[in-house]
Image: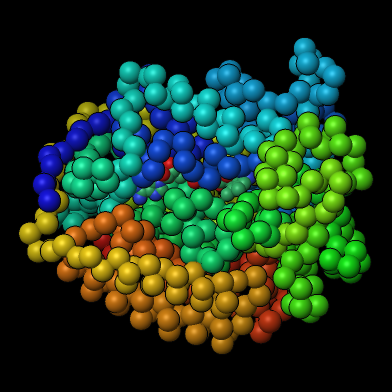
């Protein structure tokens, strides 16, 4: 395998979803940016976001109300200052997208009107979710990607997967800041050292740690794992959001059915037609998604059914086709006409509230390293993310982190020349079967033992298994050549370990973490964020 030189830029952005791509565009007029995606540029969770983006855009709504709803969903663990910051910046972020040409759905029959159609989702007390029909993420990602491709200051590196961050400490230098990252060029099978004055982790979530997930394959928690190995603190990993309604069909691969459907009146029932949500929450189908997911999980287990039904067929067919064209079309492909019949649905891992600890400027613990989007823990979501608040968080933090980086770039300095990747110790291996087997095992036990309902015993079982897997993978990793499958498995196993350790530490049920051993919320006046500290953290902080 060839060893291939280095690349130097002002800013290295790893990840090209909502967070990474909007940062690239914000920075590129003043800085040389490398924008990296491990698959094609647009392949990301962002591309599949359906519902929309929440922001206060209507005079009947208020910043106070959006803040209160977010804090309420977060179950006492949000950082209120962060929530206020994000909510206040919301309208500006939406305007930024509109100025960039992102086309949101307007009020019906008012094509020339300035009024955008706002929808309502679980946990929101107002209609405040702006959307592009039911394919908001797609409209946004494709529009921004086109501009990134055309920008002369943005160099794109598609199908390049980051392996690890390069810190001064690791190189034996006096400083311990982040200087860049090693990336595997997947098509040419070579590792390149990327050097930059600022490095951004915008790598998204980690849904692939679970057997059933709404996330695309790229969601393997790479950024979280890289940051941990580099000495950064990771917070609140136990709070995994399970989306209540993914299409249940062997070929659908967890196709998500947006909760905007429930916002527009869709009802849940058992296959025999009996409704159940009122038994769990007075808001019924409009309760926050953790309550709905748990209610479905409980109902499925109690009645032994494989799925429940979701039905919006009482709405006029034209309304359904116009507001939910993607879902209508996809369900039709699988044999369900949602204008006339209910569809079978199950819950699936959807969003991780925890991640790399970062401040209001997106700064992580390591100098020169920023974390934005789903990979970051900012304090916005607390113990539970409110629907459509995550794209908003991506956009607002992309802007604040960009501003901070531009200030830093005004100071004297340049990207450091970095040593090339050392491959001397490793050999080729064709044992892909080991990787596939370990991956499947991990996702299965995470689903069974660290899923919607947890217990101490199940978590301990999961911990024993993840320890074994980590041991095996570390042995494998140090002896064989890196491949993207091995990189992802190594990261997912580490992220699974962080999720399990965090879940074991939380001796209460709160927000998205529900355990039968401690079914109530602890009465502590100031509930704690779960913070995991790596062994090399002190060194990372010392500089
Ligand atoms: C089906 C679905 C529907 C959703 N609907 C909504 C919604 O309506 N509203 C809302 O607010 N939120 C929604 N969410 C959540 C939201 O889409 C995500 O939280 C958000 O898009 C995350 O954006 P991101 O930029 O952080 O990461 P992503 O969009 O996931 O992008 C991650 C990027 O990182 C790259 N990457 C990852 N690892 C590496 C590596 N090692 N090397 C190089 N590149 C790497 C990937 O290639 C990709 O480019 C939805 C999520 C899903 C899955």
Q: Is residue 171 left or right of residue 449?
A: left
Residue 442 position in % (x across, y down): 45, 72
Residue found at x 27% / y 30%: 10
Q: Quadrant of residue 72?
A: bottom right
Q: How is the image coloured?
A: rainbow
Which of the two residues, 286 or 79, is positioned nearer the viewer here? 286
> In the rendered picture of this protein, how many numbered marks are placed on residues?
0
Q: Residue at x 86, y 46 (%)?
A: 340
- Residue 318 in the image: state x and y as whole percent: 85, 32
Q: Residue furthest left?
A: 424
Q: Residue at x 30, y 77 (%)?
A: 471
Q: Position of residue 185 (x, y in %)?
A: 25, 44
Q: Nearer the viewer, residue 38 or 543?
A: 38
Q: Residue at x 26, y 36 (%)?
A: 197
Relative height, residue 465 to residue 387 (above, below): below
Tell me if residue 152 comes above or below residue 435 in the rendering. above
| Residue most extreme to the bottom | 457
**Image quadrant in which you'd find residue 503:** bottom right
Q: Report the residue that reaches farthest toward the top.
A: 112
Q: Is residue 529 visible?
A: no
Is 341 positioned to the left or the right of 347 in the image?
right
In the figure, is residue 313 to the left or right of 179?
A: right
- Report x, y in % for residue 30: 35, 20
Residue nearest the observer in this picture, 223 or 103? 103
The quadrant holding residue 489 is bottom left
Q: Is residue 136 in view from this perspective?
A: yes
Residue 125, relative to residue 461: is it above or below?
above
């Amino acid at each position: 395998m060839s060893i291939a030189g280095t690349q130097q830029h002002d800013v290295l952005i790893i990840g090209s979803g909502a967070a990474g791509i909007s940062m690239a565009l914000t920075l590129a007029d003043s800085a040389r940016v490398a924008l990296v995606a491990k698959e094609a540029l647009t392949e990301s969770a962002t591309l599949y976001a359906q519902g929309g983006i929440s922001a206060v855009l209507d005079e009947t709504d208020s910043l106070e109300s959006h803040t209160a709803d977010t804090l309420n969903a977060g179950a006492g663990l949000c950082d209120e200052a962060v929530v206020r910051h994000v909510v206040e910046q919301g309208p500006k972020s939406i305007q930024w997208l509109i100025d960039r040409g992102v086309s949101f759905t307007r009020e019906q029959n008012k094509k020339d009107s300035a009024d955008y159609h706002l929808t309502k989702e679980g946990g929101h007390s107002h209609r405040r979710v702006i959307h592009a029909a039911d394919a908001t993420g797609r409209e946004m990602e494709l529009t921004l990607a086109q501009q990134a491709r055309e920008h002369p200051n943005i160099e794109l590196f598609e199908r390049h997967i980051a392996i690890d961050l390069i810190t001064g400490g690791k190189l034996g230098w006096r400083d311990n800041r982040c200087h860049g990252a090693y990336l595997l060029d997947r098509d040419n099978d070579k590792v390149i050292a990327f050097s930059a004055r600022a490095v951004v982790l915008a790598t998204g979530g980690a849904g692939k740690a679970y057997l059933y997930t709404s996330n695309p394959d790229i969601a393997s928690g790479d950024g979280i794992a890289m940051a941990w190995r580099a000495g950064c603190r990771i917070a609140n990993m136990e709070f995994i959001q399970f989306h209540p309604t993914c299409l249940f069909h062997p070929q659908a691969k967890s196709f998500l059915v947006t909760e905007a459907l429930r916002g527009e009146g869709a009802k849940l029932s058992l296959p025999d037609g009996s409704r159940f949500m009122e038994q769990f929450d007075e808001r019924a189908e409009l309760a926050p998604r953790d309550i709905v997911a748990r209610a479905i999980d409980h109902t499925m287990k109690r009645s032994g059914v494989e799925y429940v039904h979701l039905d919006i067929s009482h709405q006029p067919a034209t309304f359904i086709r116009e507001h939910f064209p993607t879902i209508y079309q996809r369900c039709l492909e699988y044999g369900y006409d949602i204008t006339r019949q209910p569809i079978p649905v199950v819950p699936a891992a959807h969003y991780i509230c925890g991640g790399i600890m970062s401040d209001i400027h997106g700064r992580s613990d390591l100098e020169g390293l920023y974390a934005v989007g789903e990979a970051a823990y900012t304090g916005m979501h607390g113990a539970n993310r409110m629907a459509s608040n995550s794209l908003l968080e991506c956009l607002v933090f992309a802007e604040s982190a960009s501003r901070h980086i531009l200030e830093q770039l005004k100071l004297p300095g340049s990207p450091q020349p970095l040593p090339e990747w050392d491959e001397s110790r490793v050999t080729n291996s064709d044992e892909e079967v080991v990787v596939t087997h370990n991956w499947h095992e991990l996702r299965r036990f995470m689903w069974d033992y660290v899923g919607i309902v947890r217990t101490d015993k199940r978590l301990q079982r999961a911990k024993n298994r993840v320890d074994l897997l980590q041991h095996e993978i570390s042995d494998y990793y140090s002896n064989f050549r890196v491949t993207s499958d091995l990189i992802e498995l190594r990261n997912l196993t580490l992220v699974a370990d962080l999720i399990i350790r965090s879940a074991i530490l939380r001796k209460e049920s709160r927000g998205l973490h529900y355990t039968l051993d401690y079914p109530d919320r602890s009465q502590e006046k100031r509930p704690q964020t779960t913070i995991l500290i790596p062994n090399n953290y002190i060194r990372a902080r010392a500089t």
